[in-house]
Amino acid sequence: MLVDSHCHIDFPDYPEGVTPLLAHMQAAEVAYALCISVDLERFPRVLDLAETHANVFASVGVHPDHDQCREPDVAELVRLAAHHRVVAIGETGLDYYRRPREELDWQRARFRTHIRAARAVGKPLVVHTRNAAQDTLAIMTEEGANEAGGVMHCFTESQAVADAALELGFYISFSGIVTFRNAQDLKEVARSVPLERLLIETDAPYLAPVPHRGKRNEPAYVRHVAEEIARLRGISLEEVARISTRNFFDLFRAARPSRQPLPSGSG
């Protein structure tokens, strides 16, 4: 079985609702999906999906690039993350793509808030970084993010950044971007990340993998990401599925199924 470790199936991009998406997941042997919160206003919808569907989990957090939303504090994030269907804090991090670093003190403060909440509640972080890798890693180090653990989601950075995140105990998650022909450097990172620290995701509705590039993404398409990882690593799709699923439940411990055995060891 496969797991989509990062998607946004609560978004209005899915006017038909999640029922067809769940059916497509089942057909593609994608057993679970983690629906990621991007602001507190939409968090109730994310949580409702996780409470309604046994194979959907939730996170709680505010995206670093969302400035027109309610600002969280540590206490509120801890309270919301205590829910048994919430398995992570985030997504959080830094995004300098649209504005210069000098204007984004509020992003750095928000990131620190999320790290402190993750440490307090004992749940891992889902980290987004764009054009801000060095500041992201510096704050993670300063705030003791290694105590909470987590994942660098939709990874597109260099091998050096991957190595620094791995040194902090973080996992590296690959999205559909790794299937793109022009992503050669990223493919090399995907070849080298230790298998026991590797996750896969869609970031749906964004970044659909080949052969669906340019179309709306959905959790079922994480299978294409797994196929590309298998090709790059010279291992079977079944091995990638086994390892990445085991890694998901090793990291997101609150998501562990109580009655269903997990895949054996991670290689």
Image (spheres, rainbow, N blue to C red):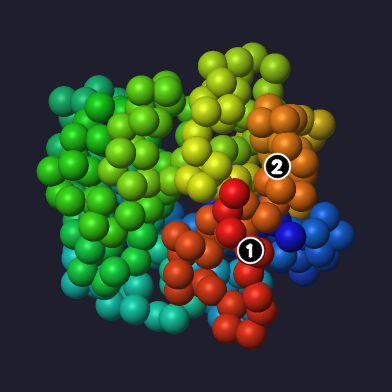
Q: Is residue 47 visible?
A: no
Q: Earlier in the sequence, mark 2 or mark 1?
A: 2
Secondary-structure class at tag 2: helix
Q: Is residue 71 left or right of residue 202?
A: left
**Residue carrying label 2:** 226
The x and y percentages for residue 266 are 58, 53
Which residue does the image show at 52% across and 28% down from the upper left?
192
Q: Is residue 107 visible?
A: yes
Which residue does the image show at 45% across and 74% down from the upper left?
254
Q: Nearer the viewer, residue 137 or 43?
A: 137
Counting other residues with Cα less than 10 Å from the Cα at mark 2, is it few (<14), some (14-19), or many (20 or more)?
A: many
Secondary-structure class at tag 1: loop
Q: Nearer the viewer, residue 191 or 187?
A: 191
Q: Is residue 126 above or below residue 103?
A: below
For the residue marked with disc 2, what is the amino acid? Ala
The x and y percentages for residue 131 are 35, 24
Q: Is residue 26 left or right of residue 61?
A: right
Q: How many marks?
A: 2
Q: Quadrant of the N terminus?
A: bottom right
Give the CA distance from mark 2 to mark 1: 18 Å
For the residue marked with disc 1, what is the amino acid? Ser
Q: Nearer the viewer, residue 193 or 140?
A: 193
Which residue does the image show at 58% across and 59% down from the upper left?
265
In the displayed image of the protein, which residue is found farthest to the bottom?
Answer: 259
Quadrant housing residue 12: bottom right
**Residue carrying label 1:** 264
